[in-house]
Image (tube, rainbow, N blue to C red):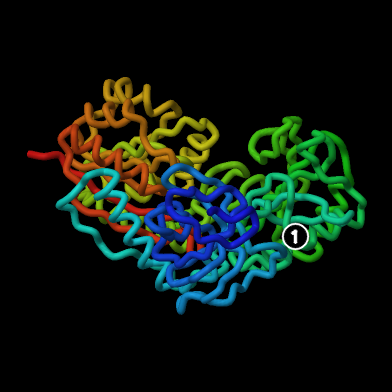
Amino acid sequence: MNGSPGQTTSAPQSARPRRGDRLELSIESIAQGGAGLARREGYVVFVEGGFPGDTVVAEVTKSKRHFAHARAVEVIEPSPDRLPIRCDQDGDGCPGSPWQGFRYERQLEHKQRLVEEALTRLGGLEGFAMEPIVGSEDPWRYRNKLEYSFGETDGRLVLGFHARGSWERIEDVRDCVLASEQNNAARNLVRDWCAEEGLSTYDRRESAGFLRNLVVREGRRTGDLQLRLVTSPGDFRAEALAAAVTERLPEAGVLWTRMDTVAEVSQGGTTAIVTGPERITEELCGLRFSISAEAFFQTNTDMAERLYGLAVDYAALEGRQRVYDLFCGIGTLSLSLALHAGEVWGVDIVEEAIGDAERNARANEIENAHFVAGDVRHILRPLAETAPRPDLIVVDPPRAGLSKKVVARMAEQRPRRIVYVSCNPTTLAPNAAQLSAEGYRLVKVRPVDMFPHTPHIECVAVLERDG
Protein backbone atom coordinates (compact mmCIF):
# COMPACT_ATOMS: atom_id res chain seq x y z
CA MET A 1 0.00 0.00 0.00
CA ASN A 2 1.10 3.57 -0.66
CA GLY A 3 1.96 5.55 2.45
CA SER A 4 -0.06 8.56 3.45
CA PRO A 5 1.31 12.00 2.54
CA GLY A 6 4.29 12.93 4.69
CA GLN A 7 5.26 9.32 5.45
CA THR A 8 8.27 7.43 4.08
CA THR A 9 6.93 4.60 1.92
CA SER A 10 8.25 1.70 -0.13
CA ALA A 11 5.19 1.08 -2.28
CA PRO A 12 5.44 -1.26 -5.28
CA GLN A 13 5.77 0.22 -8.75
CA SER A 14 2.10 -0.43 -9.50
CA ALA A 15 1.12 2.01 -6.74
CA ARG A 16 2.31 5.29 -8.14
CA PRO A 17 3.48 7.71 -5.42
CA ARG A 18 1.23 10.62 -4.69
CA ARG A 19 2.11 14.23 -4.16
CA GLY A 20 3.33 14.65 -0.58
CA ASP A 21 4.60 11.08 -0.20
CA ARG A 22 8.09 10.76 1.26
CA LEU A 23 10.38 8.20 -0.35
CA GLU A 24 13.79 6.90 0.67
CA LEU A 25 15.89 7.00 -2.50
CA SER A 26 19.46 6.48 -3.67
CA ILE A 27 20.58 9.05 -6.24
CA GLU A 28 22.26 7.41 -9.23
CA SER A 29 23.18 10.31 -11.50
CA ILE A 30 22.13 13.75 -12.66
CA ALA A 31 19.43 14.22 -15.28
CA GLN A 32 19.04 16.92 -17.92
CA GLY A 33 17.93 20.03 -16.05
CA GLY A 34 20.10 19.32 -13.02
CA ALA A 35 17.94 17.18 -10.73
CA GLY A 36 19.24 13.97 -9.18
CA LEU A 37 17.94 10.80 -10.82
CA ALA A 38 16.74 7.87 -8.70
CA ARG A 39 14.82 4.68 -9.50
CA ARG A 40 12.33 2.91 -7.30
CA GLU A 41 11.57 -0.53 -8.70
CA GLY A 42 11.99 0.87 -12.19
CA TYR A 43 9.95 4.00 -11.54
CA VAL A 44 12.01 7.15 -12.17
CA VAL A 45 12.08 9.98 -9.64
CA PHE A 46 13.82 13.30 -10.35
CA VAL A 47 15.04 14.68 -7.03
CA GLU A 48 15.84 18.35 -6.64
CA GLY A 49 18.72 18.77 -4.18
CA GLY A 50 19.96 15.20 -4.57
CA PHE A 51 23.51 14.45 -5.75
CA PRO A 52 24.90 11.16 -7.11
CA GLY A 53 25.85 8.92 -4.18
CA ASP A 54 23.31 10.46 -1.78
CA THR A 55 20.67 8.47 0.05
CA VAL A 56 17.85 10.89 0.79
CA VAL A 57 14.29 11.21 1.94
CA ALA A 58 12.49 13.01 -0.88
CA GLU A 59 9.03 14.52 -0.86
CA VAL A 60 7.04 14.03 -4.06
CA THR A 61 5.94 17.32 -5.62
CA LYS A 62 4.51 16.00 -8.90
CA SER A 63 3.54 12.47 -9.89
CA LYS A 64 3.17 11.16 -13.46
CA ARG A 65 2.53 7.68 -14.82
CA HIS A 66 6.18 6.87 -15.50
CA PHE A 67 8.09 9.38 -13.39
CA ALA A 68 7.79 11.80 -10.51
CA HIS A 69 9.43 15.01 -9.35
CA ALA A 70 10.50 15.37 -5.74
CA ARG A 71 12.74 17.44 -3.50
CA ALA A 72 15.21 16.17 -0.96
CA VAL A 73 14.07 17.01 2.59
CA GLU A 74 16.66 14.91 4.47
CA VAL A 75 20.06 13.48 3.59
CA ILE A 76 20.32 10.08 5.27
CA GLU A 77 23.74 9.23 3.86
CA PRO A 78 25.64 11.95 2.00
CA SER A 79 27.56 11.38 -1.20
CA PRO A 80 31.34 11.42 -0.78
CA ASP A 81 31.22 14.36 -3.22
CA ARG A 82 28.77 16.38 -1.09
CA LEU A 83 30.34 19.45 0.54
CA PRO A 84 29.12 22.03 3.07
CA ILE A 85 27.49 24.95 1.28
CA ARG A 86 29.03 28.41 1.60
CA CYS A 87 25.83 30.37 1.04
CA ASP A 88 24.39 32.19 4.06
CA GLN A 89 20.90 32.40 2.57
CA ASP A 90 17.96 31.49 4.78
CA GLY A 91 15.60 28.67 3.87
CA ASP A 92 16.51 25.55 1.89
CA GLY A 93 19.56 26.83 0.05
CA CYS A 94 20.29 29.30 -2.72
CA PRO A 95 18.10 28.91 -5.83
CA GLY A 96 20.82 30.62 -7.87
CA SER A 97 23.57 28.07 -7.10
CA PRO A 98 21.87 24.73 -6.38
CA TRP A 99 25.03 22.69 -7.06
CA GLN A 100 27.35 24.54 -4.69
CA GLY A 101 27.24 21.57 -2.29
CA PHE A 102 28.56 19.24 -5.02
CA ARG A 103 32.31 18.87 -5.59
CA TYR A 104 33.29 21.06 -8.57
CA GLU A 105 35.26 18.35 -10.39
CA ARG A 106 32.15 16.17 -10.36
CA GLN A 107 30.02 19.04 -11.66
CA LEU A 108 32.28 19.24 -14.69
CA GLU A 109 32.14 15.48 -15.29
CA HIS A 110 28.34 15.45 -15.24
CA LYS A 111 28.05 18.51 -17.49
CA GLN A 112 30.33 16.85 -20.04
CA ARG A 113 28.18 13.70 -19.92
CA LEU A 114 24.90 15.64 -20.20
CA VAL A 115 26.07 17.38 -23.38
CA GLU A 116 27.14 14.12 -25.00
CA GLU A 117 23.91 12.36 -23.96
CA ALA A 118 21.77 15.19 -25.36
CA LEU A 119 23.51 15.01 -28.73
CA THR A 120 23.46 11.22 -29.03
CA ARG A 121 20.09 10.42 -27.45
CA LEU A 122 18.00 13.49 -28.25
CA GLY A 123 19.68 14.37 -31.52
CA GLY A 124 20.57 10.87 -32.71
CA LEU A 125 23.99 12.20 -33.71
CA GLU A 126 27.21 10.22 -33.93
CA GLY A 127 30.73 10.42 -35.32
CA PHE A 128 31.57 13.80 -33.80
CA ALA A 129 34.52 14.63 -31.52
CA MET A 130 33.49 15.35 -27.92
CA GLU A 131 36.21 17.61 -26.57
CA PRO A 132 36.87 18.01 -22.81
CA ILE A 133 34.92 20.64 -20.92
CA VAL A 134 36.58 23.97 -20.18
CA GLY A 135 36.31 24.48 -16.43
CA SER A 136 36.68 27.67 -14.42
CA GLU A 137 39.91 28.40 -12.58
CA ASP A 138 37.89 30.13 -9.84
CA PRO A 139 34.26 28.98 -9.65
CA TRP A 140 33.27 31.51 -6.95
CA ARG A 141 32.21 35.18 -7.13
CA TYR A 142 32.23 35.15 -10.92
CA ARG A 143 28.98 36.95 -11.78
CA ASN A 144 29.28 40.48 -13.18
CA LYS A 145 25.51 41.01 -12.96
CA LEU A 146 22.86 40.00 -10.43
CA GLU A 147 19.21 40.90 -10.18
CA TYR A 148 17.63 40.97 -6.73
CA SER A 149 14.00 41.21 -5.65
CA PHE A 150 12.56 43.20 -2.77
CA GLY A 151 10.16 41.57 -0.34
CA GLU A 152 8.97 41.54 3.23
CA THR A 153 9.42 38.90 5.90
CA ASP A 154 7.85 39.29 9.37
CA GLY A 155 7.45 43.00 8.74
CA ARG A 156 11.12 43.39 7.76
CA LEU A 157 12.29 44.57 4.33
CA VAL A 158 14.41 41.94 2.58
CA LEU A 159 16.37 41.95 -0.66
CA GLY A 160 17.53 38.75 -2.33
CA PHE A 161 16.19 35.91 -4.44
CA HIS A 162 12.86 34.15 -4.81
CA ALA A 163 12.75 31.02 -2.66
CA ARG A 164 12.73 27.75 -4.59
CA GLY A 165 9.32 27.05 -6.01
CA SER A 166 7.84 30.35 -4.78
CA TRP A 167 7.02 33.49 -6.71
CA GLU A 168 6.07 35.46 -3.59
CA ARG A 169 8.61 34.54 -0.87
CA ILE A 170 11.94 36.37 -1.00
CA GLU A 171 14.94 34.98 0.88
CA ASP A 172 17.16 37.74 2.25
CA VAL A 173 20.81 37.66 1.15
CA ARG A 174 23.79 39.17 2.94
CA ASP A 175 26.66 37.42 1.16
CA CYS A 176 25.99 35.82 -2.22
CA VAL A 177 28.95 33.54 -2.98
CA LEU A 178 28.58 34.12 -6.73
CA ALA A 179 28.72 37.91 -6.35
CA SER A 180 31.80 40.03 -5.77
CA GLU A 181 32.39 41.75 -2.43
CA GLN A 182 31.57 45.04 -4.17
CA ASN A 183 28.26 43.69 -5.45
CA ASN A 184 27.33 42.38 -1.99
CA ALA A 185 28.24 45.70 -0.37
CA ALA A 186 26.09 47.61 -2.89
CA ARG A 187 23.04 45.38 -2.35
CA ASN A 188 23.29 45.51 1.44
CA LEU A 189 23.70 49.29 1.42
CA VAL A 190 20.58 49.79 -0.75
CA ARG A 191 18.50 47.39 1.35
CA ASP A 192 19.45 49.05 4.63
CA TRP A 193 18.90 52.55 3.25
CA CYS A 194 15.46 51.68 1.86
CA ALA A 195 14.49 50.04 5.18
CA GLU A 196 15.45 53.19 7.08
CA GLU A 197 13.37 55.26 4.66
CA GLY A 198 10.35 53.03 5.33
CA LEU A 199 9.73 52.35 1.63
CA SER A 200 7.12 49.73 0.78
CA THR A 201 7.80 46.63 -1.35
CA TYR A 202 5.82 45.56 -4.39
CA ASP A 203 3.23 42.85 -3.79
CA ARG A 204 2.38 41.00 -7.01
CA ARG A 205 -0.76 39.54 -5.49
CA GLU A 206 -2.13 42.96 -4.62
CA SER A 207 -0.40 44.84 -7.48
CA ALA A 208 0.64 47.45 -4.94
CA GLY A 209 3.84 48.72 -3.36
CA PHE A 210 6.93 50.61 -4.48
CA LEU A 211 10.26 48.73 -4.43
CA ARG A 212 10.56 45.95 -7.04
CA ASN A 213 14.13 45.02 -8.03
CA LEU A 214 17.74 46.02 -7.77
CA VAL A 215 20.08 45.20 -10.66
CA VAL A 216 23.80 45.42 -9.86
CA ARG A 217 26.20 45.29 -12.79
CA GLU A 218 30.00 45.50 -12.90
CA GLY A 219 32.81 45.87 -15.37
CA ARG A 220 35.14 43.25 -13.91
CA ARG A 221 38.10 44.42 -16.02
CA THR A 222 37.38 48.17 -15.71
CA GLY A 223 36.05 48.56 -12.16
CA ASP A 224 32.80 50.17 -13.34
CA LEU A 225 29.77 49.64 -11.11
CA GLN A 226 26.12 50.38 -11.85
CA LEU A 227 23.08 50.07 -9.59
CA ARG A 228 19.64 50.21 -11.19
CA LEU A 229 16.70 50.48 -8.81
CA VAL A 230 13.40 49.30 -10.29
CA THR A 231 10.21 50.64 -8.68
CA SER A 232 6.54 51.21 -9.33
CA PRO A 233 5.48 54.74 -10.35
CA GLY A 234 5.92 57.17 -7.48
CA ASP A 235 8.69 59.14 -5.87
CA PHE A 236 11.41 58.80 -3.26
CA ARG A 237 14.64 60.56 -2.27
CA ALA A 238 16.65 59.26 -5.21
CA GLU A 239 19.43 61.83 -4.87
CA ALA A 240 19.86 60.94 -1.19
CA LEU A 241 20.21 57.25 -2.08
CA ALA A 242 22.78 58.09 -4.76
CA ALA A 243 24.75 60.17 -2.25
CA ALA A 244 24.74 57.31 0.26
CA VAL A 245 25.92 54.89 -2.44
CA THR A 246 28.72 57.05 -3.80
CA GLU A 247 29.96 57.90 -0.30
CA ARG A 248 30.64 54.18 0.22
CA LEU A 249 31.27 53.21 -3.43
CA PRO A 250 32.64 56.30 -5.25
CA GLU A 251 32.89 54.49 -8.60
CA ALA A 252 29.17 53.61 -8.68
CA GLY A 253 26.49 55.04 -10.94
CA VAL A 254 22.83 54.92 -9.97
CA LEU A 255 19.87 54.58 -12.37
CA TRP A 256 16.17 54.58 -11.52
CA THR A 257 13.64 52.61 -13.59
CA ARG A 258 9.90 53.12 -13.06
CA MET A 259 7.60 50.28 -14.16
CA ASP A 260 3.81 50.40 -14.43
CA THR A 261 3.28 46.74 -15.38
CA VAL A 262 1.61 44.25 -13.07
CA ALA A 263 4.33 41.62 -13.49
CA GLU A 264 7.61 41.85 -11.61
CA VAL A 265 10.10 42.49 -14.42
CA SER A 266 13.17 44.68 -14.72
CA GLN A 267 13.16 45.16 -18.52
CA GLY A 268 11.33 48.13 -20.01
CA GLY A 269 9.80 51.05 -18.16
CA THR A 270 11.31 54.53 -17.98
CA THR A 271 14.90 54.83 -16.81
CA ALA A 272 16.55 58.01 -15.54
CA ILE A 273 20.16 58.65 -14.57
CA VAL A 274 20.44 59.70 -10.93
CA THR A 275 24.23 59.86 -10.85
CA GLY A 276 27.12 58.55 -12.95
CA PRO A 277 27.22 57.42 -16.59
CA GLU A 278 24.38 55.78 -18.48
CA ARG A 279 26.52 52.79 -19.48
CA ILE A 280 29.31 50.73 -18.03
CA THR A 281 32.35 49.56 -19.96
CA GLU A 282 34.02 46.16 -20.00
CA GLU A 283 37.04 44.65 -21.72
CA LEU A 284 36.85 41.29 -23.47
CA CYS A 285 39.12 39.56 -25.98
CA GLY A 286 41.31 42.65 -26.21
CA LEU A 287 38.34 44.88 -27.09
CA ARG A 288 36.40 47.46 -25.07
CA PHE A 289 32.62 47.35 -24.91
CA SER A 290 30.03 49.90 -23.85
CA ILE A 291 27.03 48.19 -22.24
CA SER A 292 23.67 49.90 -21.80
CA ALA A 293 21.56 49.19 -18.74
CA GLU A 294 19.31 46.51 -20.25
CA ALA A 295 21.70 45.07 -22.84
CA PHE A 296 22.67 41.40 -22.71
CA PHE A 297 26.27 40.68 -21.79
CA GLN A 298 27.63 37.33 -20.62
CA THR A 299 27.54 37.30 -16.82
CA ASN A 300 30.91 35.58 -16.36
CA THR A 301 33.54 37.82 -17.92
CA ASP A 302 36.51 35.47 -17.63
CA MET A 303 34.68 32.45 -19.02
CA ALA A 304 32.99 34.54 -21.73
CA GLU A 305 36.45 35.36 -23.02
CA ARG A 306 37.26 31.66 -23.17
CA LEU A 307 33.89 30.86 -24.79
CA TYR A 308 34.34 33.46 -27.52
CA GLY A 309 37.99 32.51 -27.98
CA LEU A 310 36.87 28.93 -28.60
CA ALA A 311 34.21 30.11 -31.08
CA VAL A 312 36.85 32.10 -32.97
CA ASP A 313 39.16 29.05 -33.00
CA TYR A 314 36.35 26.84 -34.33
CA ALA A 315 35.58 29.43 -37.00
CA ALA A 316 39.08 28.83 -38.47
CA LEU A 317 39.12 32.21 -40.21
CA GLU A 318 41.99 33.19 -42.49
CA GLY A 319 41.37 36.91 -42.93
CA ARG A 320 39.16 36.94 -46.00
CA GLN A 321 35.94 35.06 -45.19
CA ARG A 322 32.47 36.61 -45.03
CA VAL A 323 30.65 35.94 -41.74
CA TYR A 324 27.06 36.30 -40.53
CA ASP A 325 26.73 36.52 -36.74
CA LEU A 326 23.11 35.84 -35.80
CA PHE A 327 21.69 36.99 -32.44
CA CYS A 328 24.76 39.21 -32.16
CA GLY A 329 23.65 41.38 -29.22
CA ILE A 330 26.02 44.30 -28.59
CA GLY A 331 28.62 42.82 -30.94
CA THR A 332 30.96 41.07 -28.52
CA LEU A 333 31.48 38.00 -30.71
CA SER A 334 31.01 39.85 -34.02
CA LEU A 335 33.88 42.21 -33.30
CA SER A 336 36.11 39.38 -32.09
CA LEU A 337 35.44 37.57 -35.38
CA ALA A 338 36.02 40.74 -37.40
CA LEU A 339 39.66 40.80 -36.28
CA HIS A 340 40.18 37.58 -38.29
CA ALA A 341 37.59 37.85 -41.11
CA GLY A 342 37.13 39.77 -44.32
CA GLU A 343 33.71 41.15 -43.34
CA VAL A 344 31.15 40.42 -40.62
CA TRP A 345 27.42 41.15 -40.60
CA GLY A 346 25.75 41.02 -37.17
CA VAL A 347 21.98 40.59 -36.85
CA ASP A 348 19.81 41.07 -33.77
CA ILE A 349 16.13 41.86 -33.25
CA VAL A 350 16.84 44.35 -30.43
CA GLU A 351 17.46 47.77 -31.97
CA GLU A 352 19.14 49.13 -28.83
CA ALA A 353 21.63 46.23 -28.95
CA ILE A 354 22.43 47.02 -32.58
CA GLY A 355 23.03 50.64 -31.59
CA ASP A 356 25.46 49.45 -28.91
CA ALA A 357 27.17 47.15 -31.43
CA GLU A 358 27.70 49.99 -33.89
CA ARG A 359 29.02 52.20 -31.09
CA ASN A 360 31.41 49.45 -29.99
CA ALA A 361 32.69 48.95 -33.54
CA ARG A 362 33.51 52.66 -33.82
CA ALA A 363 35.14 52.75 -30.37
CA ASN A 364 37.40 49.82 -31.30
CA GLU A 365 38.10 51.27 -34.77
CA ILE A 366 36.76 48.17 -36.52
CA GLU A 367 35.49 49.00 -39.99
CA ASN A 368 34.71 45.57 -41.43
CA ALA A 369 31.77 44.83 -39.10
CA HIS A 370 28.24 45.86 -40.10
CA PHE A 371 25.08 45.50 -38.01
CA VAL A 372 21.43 45.09 -38.95
CA ALA A 373 18.33 45.16 -36.72
CA GLY A 374 15.77 42.55 -37.63
CA ASP A 375 14.21 39.17 -36.95
CA VAL A 376 16.58 36.38 -38.02
CA ARG A 377 13.61 34.41 -39.39
CA HIS A 378 12.88 37.08 -41.98
CA ILE A 379 16.11 38.96 -42.58
CA LEU A 380 18.48 36.32 -43.96
CA ARG A 381 17.05 36.29 -47.48
CA PRO A 382 17.04 40.10 -47.94
CA LEU A 383 20.45 40.35 -46.26
CA ALA A 384 21.90 37.90 -48.78
CA GLU A 385 20.60 40.14 -51.58
CA THR A 386 22.55 43.16 -50.31
CA ALA A 387 25.58 41.47 -48.70
CA PRO A 388 27.71 38.63 -50.09
CA ARG A 389 26.62 35.15 -49.11
CA PRO A 390 28.50 33.94 -46.02
CA ASP A 391 31.36 31.49 -45.87
CA LEU A 392 30.58 31.09 -42.16
CA ILE A 393 27.48 31.54 -40.02
CA VAL A 394 27.90 31.95 -36.29
CA VAL A 395 24.76 31.63 -34.19
CA ASP A 396 24.26 32.24 -30.45
CA PRO A 397 20.52 31.77 -29.87
CA PRO A 398 18.52 31.99 -26.62
CA ARG A 399 17.81 28.87 -24.55
CA ALA A 400 14.88 27.88 -26.77
CA GLY A 401 17.31 27.37 -29.65
CA LEU A 402 16.52 27.87 -33.34
CA SER A 403 13.16 27.43 -34.99
CA LYS A 404 12.95 25.08 -37.98
CA LYS A 405 12.45 28.13 -40.19
CA VAL A 406 15.70 29.73 -39.03
CA VAL A 407 17.56 26.45 -39.59
CA ALA A 408 16.15 26.26 -43.12
CA ARG A 409 17.08 29.89 -43.84
CA MET A 410 20.64 29.27 -42.62
CA ALA A 411 20.98 26.20 -44.80
CA GLU A 412 19.75 28.19 -47.83
CA GLN A 413 22.84 30.38 -47.54
CA ARG A 414 25.04 27.29 -47.90
CA PRO A 415 27.93 28.44 -45.69
CA ARG A 416 30.84 26.04 -45.61
CA ARG A 417 30.86 26.07 -41.81
CA ILE A 418 28.43 26.85 -38.97
CA VAL A 419 29.62 27.62 -35.45
CA TYR A 420 26.81 27.18 -32.93
CA VAL A 421 27.27 28.73 -29.46
CA SER A 422 24.67 27.05 -27.27
CA CYS A 423 23.41 27.73 -23.76
CA ASN A 424 21.20 24.63 -23.76
CA PRO A 425 22.37 21.24 -25.08
CA THR A 426 18.79 19.94 -25.23
CA THR A 427 17.99 22.50 -27.94
CA LEU A 428 21.40 22.28 -29.61
CA ALA A 429 20.77 18.55 -30.18
CA PRO A 430 17.60 18.82 -32.32
CA ASN A 431 18.99 21.88 -34.13
CA ALA A 432 22.17 19.97 -35.01
CA ALA A 433 20.02 17.05 -36.20
CA GLN A 434 17.97 19.42 -38.39
CA LEU A 435 21.16 20.86 -39.86
CA SER A 436 22.37 17.32 -40.47
CA ALA A 437 19.24 16.72 -42.53
CA GLU A 438 20.11 19.88 -44.51
CA GLY A 439 23.51 18.49 -45.47
CA TYR A 440 25.73 19.47 -42.55
CA ARG A 441 27.86 17.21 -40.39
CA LEU A 442 28.52 17.80 -36.70
CA VAL A 443 32.32 17.80 -36.44
CA LYS A 444 33.10 18.60 -32.81
CA VAL A 445 31.63 20.02 -29.62
CA ARG A 446 33.21 21.44 -26.50
CA PRO A 447 31.35 22.44 -23.31
CA VAL A 448 32.38 25.57 -21.40
CA ASP A 449 31.40 25.97 -17.75
CA MET A 450 30.09 29.52 -17.76
CA PHE A 451 27.95 28.98 -14.66
CA PRO A 452 29.70 26.95 -11.94
CA HIS A 453 27.47 25.57 -9.16
CA THR A 454 24.43 25.61 -11.45
CA PRO A 455 23.12 23.01 -13.94
CA HIS A 456 23.40 25.47 -16.85
CA ILE A 457 25.77 24.39 -19.62
CA GLU A 458 27.25 26.37 -22.49
CA CYS A 459 29.03 24.72 -25.38
CA VAL A 460 30.42 25.48 -28.82
CA ALA A 461 29.76 23.19 -31.77
CA VAL A 462 31.06 23.31 -35.33
CA LEU A 463 29.22 21.85 -38.31
CA GLU A 464 30.55 21.60 -41.85
CA ARG A 465 28.72 21.16 -45.14
CA ASP A 466 29.11 17.69 -46.63
CA GLY A 467 31.05 17.76 -49.84
Outermost residue, front direction? 1
Residue 392 position within the rendered picture, expressed as x and y whole percent measured from the top left? 24, 40
Q: Quadrant of residue 22?
A: bottom right
Q: Residue pushed farthest bottom?
A: 80
**Residue occupying the point 84% across, 47% down:** 238
From the top left corner, tell me how far across and down residue 348 is, in percent: 44, 33
Q: Position of residue 141 (x, y in %)?
A: 57, 67
Which residue is the site of mark 1? 172
Instruction: Residue lying at the far left in this picture: please name it.
Output: 467
Decide: is 384 above or below 315. above
Q: Does residue 219 appear in the picture of this structure?
A: no
Quadrant in which the C terminus appears: top left
Q: Name the amino acid type tagged 1.
A: Asp
Taking the spot 25% from the left edge, 53% from the top edge, the residue there is 314
| 385 versus 31 height, above or below | above
Q: Nearer the viewer, residue 140 or 22?
A: 22
| Label 1 CA crowd tier, 10 Å (few <14, some 14–19, many 20+) | many
Q: SS at mark 1?
A: strand
| Quarter of image, res 179 | bottom right
Q: Quadrant of residue 372?
A: top left
Q: Residue at 62% across / 58% down in the picture?
A: 224
Give the left or right position of residue 219, taking residue 404 as reference.
right
277 vs 50, nearest the viewer: 50
Q: Is residue 251 left or right of residue 376?
A: right
Number of numbered discs on residues = 1
